[in-house]
Image (cartoon, grey):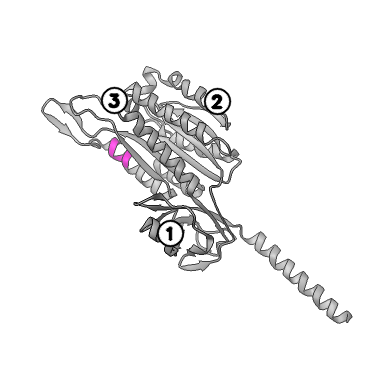
Amino acid sequence: MRRIINLLILALAIAAQSALAQDSSSKPRTIYVTAESSKTGFVGGLKAENFQILENKKELPIEFFAAGRPASVGFLFDVSGSVSGISIRDVNDTAAAISESVRNNSVKNEYFLIGFNRSVALLADWTADVGQISKGLDSLPSIQTRDNSYFTSFYDAFSRAVEQFGTAKNEKRILIMFTDGIDSGSKAKRKEIMEKAFSSDIIVYSVTLMPAVKVVHRDIQTSYPSSIPEMEGEDFLDDITGMTGGRRYKIPTSNPESIIRTHKADDRSAASRAFEMIFAELGSQYTIQYYPESMGKPEQASLLSVRLTVPKEVKKKNGAISLRYRQKYEFAER
């Protein structure tokens, strides 16, 4: 009898050591998956058993599954000349859309606001109070000086936003940028910013006021983007949102009759719809946690694949469903 008890004690000790080894050698990875249908929009009602996680083609068990988790959300607001030149009304419409989004989604989320052109300013620290965010938005003109408006420190502002997430209370971290992506005054470089984004768990969304046509002369029209800075800005926004599993929203604001981009009657509703769509997505995203097993060199990437088995009733209601999520991560540390 004593021998049996000793064996049981030994087995429990081994199991405890094994669990401790797992805890010390790896930590769970959390991913956020958006399920979307062109027929019905964001798809809810899916369960853990509908998903399959593969890392570097190896299937891994799901340890945790949930929907609608609270988020720490940062707003990055560009007031440089290339953006504010659209018209002050367009900028105000976007500010109003941000206030509305915070007002409608402040129960569990927290927010911060950074404004930038040549300078970078934290206008509202972490808060769930729409009044604090609105106050920060109202102070945007304070960083709009004539000298500052000709330069844009976008990469520096992005770097500052990543640092701000270091004090976030929620594991789910979202950065929403209102910008054209043009940088002309940063100390930080594009490669450095991309590496920071890759090393973080931040999902990046961008909202851009886009001219359909830019008139450079009475008889000459060019499509956007038409300059190297505009093209580089477009490429960066595509790359950063795609890499992190986010999404781009482009709002047309151009008047073909004018050299300057001007306001159209539906611009405000377009801005409101963009932010409404982003927060609807955040509320519908699935949180999935698993233990990564891959090991490799730091410069290599761990490739993630998420597969979905759609129940018949869900498929009948929604039609074809696509998934969006971050597909590359750093190899797990051991």
Task: Say how many tags the image has.
Answer: 3
Amino acid carrying label 2: it is: Gln
Count neighbours of disc 2 (C-alpha within 10 A) and say few if under 14, some if 14 to 19, many if 20 or more.
some
The residue at which mark 1 appears reads as 314
* Nearer to us: label 2 or label 1: 1
Q: Which residue is at the far left?
A: 219
Residue segment shown in magenta: 229-234
Q: How far apart are marks 3 and 2 (CA)?
A: 27 Å
The residue at which mark 2 appears reads as 132
Image coordinates of residue 144 in percent, x first then y, are 41, 20
Amino acid carrying label 3: it is: His
Residue 6 placement, left or right of 62 = right
Vertical placement of 185 versus 234: above or below? above
Look at the numbered discs 3 and 2 and tell me whether their residues touch, using CB distance below 8 Å. Answer: no
Secondary structure of the residue carrying numbered label 2: helix
Tell me which residue sits at (46%, 59%) in the image.
Answer: 300
Q: Which label's residue is closer to the chain start, 3 or 1?
A: 3
Q: How far apart are marks 2 and 1 (CA)?
A: 41 Å
Nearest to the observer: residue 18 or residue 272:
272
Instruction: Examine the image and state in which quarter residue 211 appears.
Output: top left
Nearest to the observer: residue 297 or residue 260:
260
Image coordinates of residue 89 in percent, x first then y, are 35, 22
